[in-house]
Image (cartoon, rainbow, N blue to C red):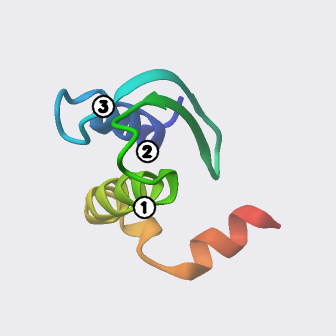
Amino acid sequence: MGKVAERLKALLDQEGQLEVDIESLEIRHNHSHLFVVADPTIAPQQRANQFKVYTSQVLRQAFAHLRTRASVQEQRS
């Protein structure tokens, strides 16, 4: 597991940050899969957006190569 993946796992493991229970987590080189138990009054797309915003901000601050769109494009090719 690379440094970005380790940091992502640590972010998601922090208790109470996102108010969900993570049942399963799989991290790939360019995406991740989460299965969570969460408050059903919040729509799934809102919950997904919370994960993306929270983790993206922290990871982009910590890893300079994630700050450009080019890094995402390179991973896809």
Marks 1/3: CA–CA distance:
18 Å
**Which element type, helix, strand or loop, lies under badge 2?**
helix
Disc tally is 3
Q: Is residue 9 placed above or below 32 in the rendered structure? A: above
Which residue has dot 3 on it?
10
Q: Please tell me which of labels 3 and 2 falls first in the chain.
A: 2
Which residue has dot 2 on it?
4
Q: Nearer the viewer, residue 23 or 2?
A: 23
Marks 1/2: CA–CA distance:
19 Å
Where is residue 33 drawn, in percent x and y?
A: 60, 38
Where is residue 54 drawn, in percent x and y?
A: 29, 57
Q: Are marks 1 and 3 in contact (CB under 8 Å)?
A: no
User: Of the residues shown, which amino acid type is indicated by label 3?
Assistant: Ala
Q: Please tell me which of labels 1 and 2 falls first in the chain.
A: 2
Q: Residue at x 50, y 50 (%)?
A: 44
User: Of the residues shown, which amino acid type is indicated by label 1?
Assistant: Asn
Density class for disc 3 (Cα within 10 Å; few <14, some 14-19, many ≥20) is: few
Q: Residue at x 26, y 64 (%)?
A: 61
User: Of the residues shown, which amino acid type is indicated by label 2?
Assistant: Val
Side of 17 where 31 appears, left or right:
right
Dot in front, 3 or 2: 3
Q: Is residue 68 placed above or below 51 in the rendered structure? A: below
Q: Is residue 65 placed above or below 62 in the rendered structure? A: below
